[in-house]
Amino acid sequence: MPDLFPLRLELFEAYLLIFTRVSAMVAFMPVIGGAGVPSRVKVALSALMAGVIFPFVDAGPVNMEDDSLVLILMVAGEAMIGMATAFFINLILSAIQLAGSFIDFQVGFGIVNVVDPATGAQVSVTTQLLNITTMLLFLSLNAHHYILSGMADSFAILPLGGFHGGQGVAEIMIDGMKAVFVASAQIAAPVTVTLLIQQAAMGLMARTVPQLNIFAVGFPFTITIGLLTIVFTMPAFSIYLEKMFAGMIARMPALFTAML
């Protein structure tokens, strides 16, 4: 009777590598990887996804008995792939948070913070509003489906144990960080420009009507103008976010290719 133990061990090694890549991405992914989602749910979801992907992956696993050190390095490489993918996805949230900080500084909410239930960290009021809008749009556009599908397709581009990193990954990450600052400036631009005009108008009023207490009137007026600008530009913000999600999903194959 043939010994099936080596075959079972090889299958376990392949599943372990797939589970490592998927779970590393799920742990840091927006919405699913938030602090509000229990760890058991994340582990169960990762195990389920790994089980679904497993039959379609062309694996060439390393024998754990003969070369356990290589297997450990492969597990570490798969974890790096998952974390790099999650980091790339979270660049969008970084742009949103930076834009919210810009807006709060202009409006006057710079010292007002609330607790973000997704991360447990303290964020500004506008940042929390933009984060909630981003999460709702993320789910309504089924962006999480495309991301999970992209992770499944990554095994065709980047096979198990194929992680080598390199300059290409660093260049993509640096380009992503540059895009964070550009996107945050573009998101905050409507409020910044509107409040700049409002401040100029308030300055003219102060010179024209010296009796007007500009400090008593200006602060609530600035908050009102800022909030109204956010409300009226929310449709444009949603369209811009949709383009950001599409661009991020389109760049994922290039990220996986750079890791080869």
Image (cartoon, helix red, strand yellow):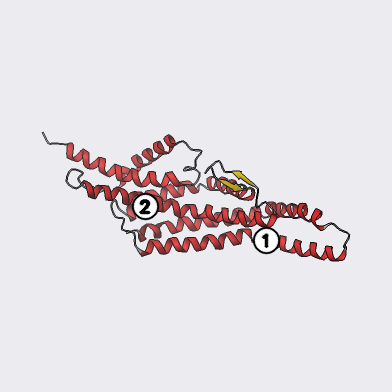
Give the label on residue 158, or none. Answer: none
Q: Which residue is mark 1?
A: 192
Amino acid type for the residue under numbered disc 1:
Thr
Residue occupying the point 46% across, 43% down: 33
**Image check: 38 left or right of 209?**
left
Q: Going by the picture, which residue comes out furthest to the left?
A: 1
Residue occupying the point 76% across, 54% down: 219
Count of labels in the image: 2
Q: Give the mark, 2 or 1, whose residue is nearer the N terminus.
A: 2
Residue occupying the point 34% across, 45% down: 20
Q: Residues within 10 Å of mark 1 (few under 14, many from 20)?
A: many
Label 1 element class: helix
Position in image of residue 134 (x %, y %): 57, 49
Image quarter in which the N terminus is found: top left
Label 2 element class: helix
Q: Is residue 219 above or below residue 2?
A: below
Give the label on residue 81, or none. Answer: 2
Q: Is residue 145 above or below residue 194?
A: above
Position in image of residue 215 (x %, y %): 79, 56
